[in-house]
Image (cartoon, grey):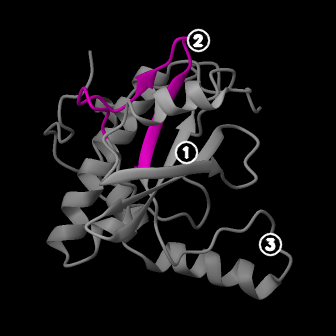
Amino acid sequence: MMITYTQEELSSIVHAFAFPGTITDWTPHGNGHINDTFLVRSTENGVLRKSILQRMNRTVFHNPTELMQNIAQVTSFLRKKITAAGGDPFRETLNLIPTTDDAWFFVDERGEFWRAFLFISNASCYDAVTDPKLFYETGNAFISSPFPADALRFPARLSFRDDPGFPQHTAPLPGAFTGGTGGSERTAEKRFG
């Protein structure tokens, strides 16, 4: 659901975020059909940096403030788990980029909500899987990683539901991973309100 913006409007939105280094350009990115996504390029000490900027589709995500609070809490929680396990939090979880006002999202003059993440380089994203082996490898990579266990340990009572009318699965799926429960501490930084 692409909304048309002028380059001046996009520039204002891009510069509302604390992207690393000096911003050089931004271009539409990917083939998504939910959010409007842009690849933002910047240079920092002569090194090219890439980031993702997204306009959140409020037709799909009715409560973008709560959505971003959920993302900030879960990624902060996962980042701590990944770091403690000796992993690479810049490759193994999303990394939000705050606005210049230290918030996790920006609201433009039209009332549209925007967010930004560090780009994960040397990763693959597929719009469709046509090779059964690739489908198998994707599932295998997911279930053999610590992500499902760590995600299940997130204290869900700290999160918001975006669409209370959306069906929620409450019983375990046959053969699904079942993990333990986590602590009750709030792990995301305060970047809301």
In the image, 70: left or right of 41? left
Under circle 3, the secondary element is loop
Instruction: Identify which amino acid the numbered label 1 is placed on.
Output: Ala
Identify the residue at horizontal 73%, vertical 26% (top origin).
3
Identify the residue at horizontal 66%, vertical 26% (top origin).
6
Answer with mark 1 or mark 2, whichever residue precedes in sequence.
2
Magenta segment range? Answer: 98-117
Answer with mark 3 or mark 1, whichever residue precedes in sequence.
3
Using the image as rendered, state which of residue 149 and residue 127 is in the foreground: 127
Instruction: Identify which amino acid the numbered label 3 is placed on.
Output: Val
Q: Is residue 156 above or below residue 107?
A: below
Q: CA distance from mark 1 to mark 2?
A: 41 Å
Under circle 1, the secondary element is loop
Residue 8 position by quadrant: top right
Asked if the stretch drawn in magenta spans residue 109, the answer is yes
In the image, 135: left or right of 178? right
- Please give the residue where the numbered disc 1 appears in the rendered image: 171
Under circle 2, the secondary element is loop
> Outermost residue, top direction?
110
Answer with mark 2 or mark 3, whichever residue precedes in sequence.
2
Instruction: Identify which amino acid the numbered label 2 is placed on.
Output: Arg
- Please give the residue where the numbered disc 2 appears in the rendered image: 110
Q: Position of residue 39 (x, y in %)?
A: 56, 53
The label on residue 32 is: none
Residue neighbourhood size for the residue with mark 1, other residues' Cα within 10 Å, grouped as few (<14), some (14–19), many (≥20): few
- Please give the residue where the numbered disc 3 appears in the rendered image: 129
